[in-house]
Image (cartoon, rainbow, N blue to C red):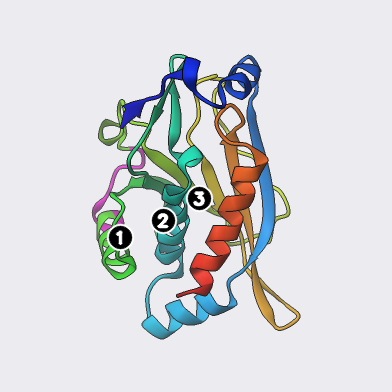
Amino acid sequence: MKYIDIDNWKRKEHFDFFYRSDYAQYNICANIDITNFLNFVRDKQISFYYAMIHASTYVANEIVNFRYRIRDGKVVMHDKLNPSFTELNGKDDDLFKLVTVDMKDDIFEFVKYAKEKSQCQRDYFPLNETAGRDDFVYITCIPWISFTHISHTFSLNKNDSVPRISWGKYFSENNRVLLPFSVQVNHALVDGVHVGEYFDKLQKHIDSM
């Protein structure tokens, strides 16, 4: 992690412009094609959810703007982002828990690790694990709805700059399987061109599996 010299930063003017906003968050939703990726996870018999968490976080790490965070008006850049995701606490429990894991480069190692961590966690919100950290991507899944838009709850905190990534229920269209996918970011750090880059890289990444 390192601090950014804002005065000599190429996006200083953009940062200052949007940091003045009361609500600098924006959200973009689009369908991504998971036909090949779904075949991959089924063939390898691994969890689609954990595999998608890995793919989403892997690509976020490739885009520097997704690794910026705001701390009391200053900007830091993380070396690596880690996923913090929601998951139902059990088949007989309709309440979810927030699970935070370290990112692994290997998808199979990550899926095994994330599953074990989730199964062992009993607390819904183990905030002691994440206190003082912002090196996350917040991830959630709404597998019951093929949504066209989604919003997230958060405090009106100008420093809130952790990206929110979400997806819904996948569906078939024209012999392809599509997944509603949402990216929410802070405009002081991330512009539309960067979200577009994220969607493009994510599609290429999951197609390559």
- Kindly report the distance in space between the C-alpha atoms of the residues bearing marks 1 and 3: 20 Å
Percent coordinates x, y for residue 94 in the rendering: 47, 53
Residue 119 shown in magenta = yes
Report the residue at 44% width, 51% height from top: 62
Label 3: state its secondary structure.
strand
Crowding near pointer 2: few (<14 within 10 Å), some, many (20+)? many
- Kindly report the distance in space between the C-alpha atoms of the residues bearing marks 3 and 2: 16 Å
**Can you identify the residue that label 2 sits on?**
58
Residue 167 at least partly seen = no
**Can you identify the residue that label 3 sits on?**
140
Mark before the other along the chain sequence, 2 or 1: 2
Mark before the other along the chain sequence, 1 or 3: 1
Does residue 160 lie above or below 106 as drawn? above
Which residues are drawn in magenta?
A: 118-125
Percent coordinates x, y for residue 26 in the rendering: 66, 35
Residues 16 and 172: in front is 16
